[in-house]
Image: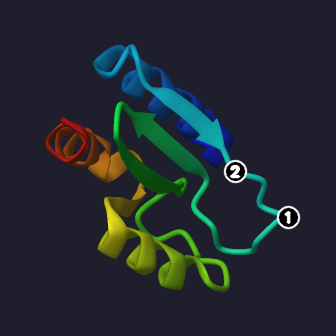
Amino acid sequence: MRENQFQSKLIKSIRERFPDSLIMKNDPDYIQGIPDLLVLNKNKWAALECKKSENAKHQPNQDYYVEKMNGMSYACFVFPENMEDVLNDLELALK
């Protein structure tokens, strides 16, 4: 599965679990390494960096921004192999 296909599937799953949330796709050319998706739900947020697989290469600064944003709220790398776990973690983080 290509990363953009996985990202579409993930967005659909997030919308099903959090129908009132706002999901924003970040511009990868603006700040290199900022996670792909920002999920806003009421007064909470999460940032998700989508990868096509667990072993996919990380781009420069991605680890830094995921770690920094996870310290502020919730952020992680998400790929098909851990998607259900991440969705469950999102439920805890965004409620």
Instruction: From this view, report whether residue 52 is shown above or below residue 25.
Output: below
- Residue identified by numbered label 1: 29
- As shown in the figure, which amino acid type bears the numbered disc 1? Asp
Instruction: From this view, report whether residue 42 is shown above or below residue 82.
Output: above
Q: Residue at x 58, y 29 (%)?
A: 8
Dots 2, 1 in contact, CB < 8 A: no
- State the colouring used for the structure image: rainbow
What's the CA distance linking mark 2 and mark 1? 9 Å
Q: Decide if residue 89 is on the left or right side of residue 33.
A: left
Q: Nearer the viewer, residue 92 or 54?
A: 92
Residue density around tag 2, few if under 14, some if 14–19, many if 20 or more, within 10 Å: some
Q: Position of residue 27 (x, y in %)?
A: 78, 54
- As shown in the figure, which amino acid type bears the numbered disc 2? Asn
Q: Residue at x 26, y 39 (%)?
A: 87
Q: Position of residue 80 (x, y in %)?
A: 39, 46
Q: Decide if residue 33 is on the left or right side of residue 15.
A: right
Q: Decide if residue 50 is on the left or right side of residue 30.
A: left
Secondary structure of the residue carrying numbered label 2: loop
Instruction: From this view, report whether residue 46 is shown above or below residue 14.
Output: below
Q: Residue at x 46, y 40 (%)?
A: 39
- How many discs mark residues in the rendered view? 2
Q: Nearer the viewer, residue 42 or 74?
A: 42
Quarter of the view holding residue 16: top left
Secondary structure of the residue carrying numbered label 1: loop
Q: Nearer the viewer, residue 81 or 92?
A: 92
Residue density around tag 1, few if under 14, some if 14–19, many if 20 or more, within 10 Å: few
Q: Residue at x 34, y 39 (%)?
A: 43
Quadrant in the picture for the C terminus: top left
Q: Of the numbered discs in the image, which one, if any, rests on residue 26?
A: 2
Q: Position of residue 23 (x, y in %)?
A: 54, 33
